[in-house]
Image (tube, grey):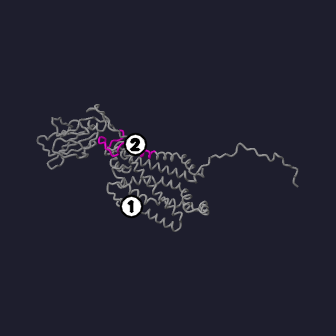
Amino acid sequence: MSDTSWQPSPGDFAIAPQHQTADVITRPSMSYWQDAWRRLKENKRALFSLYLIIGLVMFTVAGPYLWNIDPSAQDLDQIGMAPGAERNVTVAPAYTPWYGPEDSLTYAQDNRLGLTLVGVATSQAVRLAWQAPQKGQTNYGYKIYRTLFALNDGDAFGLPLMETQNEYFEDRLDLQPTDYYYTVVALDRHGLETDQTSTIQLTVMRVITLLEAEKRGLTEDGLVKEGDQIKLALHPFGTDYLGRDMLARLIYGGQVSLFIGIFAPLLYVLLGVIYGSIAGFMGGAVDQLMMRFADFAVALPFLLFMILLKVIFGIGPGESGVLPMLVAMVILLWPAPARLVRGQILQIREEGYVSASKLLGAKTDYLVFRHMIPNTMGVILVTITFQVPSAIFTEAFLSFIGMGVAPPTPSWGSMCNDGIKSMLTRPHELFFPALFISITVLAFNLLGDGLRDALDARMRNRE
């Protein structure tokens, strides 16, 4: 039998007091893209890569205004100069022709022909003289050699400069301020080399004429005279084998490389997104037919197609092939992003919210552009960031083999092609463009990894 003695009181119906330890929201409400940006900022490597890419773009865009140097201008007094090289130059009189020594010379006594230097060895000219044959000896000519390296027994004499019957020689061939070794070899009546040789070591001094210094703006009028030392133009990254400023060429070369590396992936990824979206949404026989055509596009050889496009566009040897390169990339590289987007569309179209939109009468274009493509934006952005390094490498490779950007238009790939020819003697010509290519590719790869983690919804559920 139940107890009916209890009677409710007004206090039983009072509002319960609120506890100060009530639940609070630990994270503010965020949209998908706000949360993706938050997670991207937490990835230090990806964030640094993003800033580095922005810096590279600013380097190529603002660089010409900050470093106003013509990338095709040649500084003939500083050919192949490394960064930080000596820039001092001596003002010398203008060059005058030389027809052999006029005064008696004291010939060197430590070799058979007495090879000696006449005057001062400068970057204008090096003048050499040697003794005529002694009595009882007849020399029918001489051959002159030059090298940068000290000679040992059995070594080759170096670069043959000239064969002459005179006892003097003037060298004006690409003289640089460095040490040279000159060798004169006597020839017999048959033009064969004999054992009569003379070798001399000398150091070439860099000089410039007063008129040339004034023309280049290196002097103040009336304050510089012959014999004074002045400084040549500054080249922070050195010069190449033609005396062109490496920093200016890296800036303008970056414009070409980044344009191809970014613009081409945007085009063929966009084409792949449209193609893959249609194939995934239509499904069935249409999907299978479209994917088989994509397989056919993958099977086309890129280099052969590149050659064919150069012929179609009328690009001859030595001409820049930027346009055929872009067309070849767009035509042949879209199947990879198309397959990724198709896979995402096939998955998304089976989701409940898509079925609900269909029941409410949503049209095809609404379903594709409102639901499907926005939900594949993460995959699309990651694909673009991974395709940019591939496009940059493709441009560098084609320019390296002479099928891409042609001189004098600079690109990082064509600069590597030029630099590898003098890699042992002037390594900076190869090092700097290769470094910029490597940094750019690494930055886009790290950014792609960060975007993949930030835009993956499954990563959000693990936090």
* x then y, percent, for residue 314: 34, 59
Please tell me which residue lies in front, 131 or 359: 359
* x then y, percent, for residue 61: 42, 46
- Look at the image and tell me whether residue 154 can be seen: no
Name the residue rendered at 64%, 46% in the picture. 26
Q: Residue furthest top?
A: 223
- The correct choice, above or below, for 199 with respect to 384 in the image is above
- Look at the image and tell me whether residue 122 can be seen: yes
The label on residue 381 is none
Query: What type is the residue that disc 2 sits on?
Result: Tyr
* Image: magenta residue range: 55-84
Earlier in the chain: of badge 1 and badge 2, it is 2
* x then y, percent, for residue 298: 44, 62
- Please state if 335 lies on the left or on the right of 210 as rendered: right
- Which residue is label 2 attached to? 65
Name the residue rendered at 18%, 43% in the picture. 196
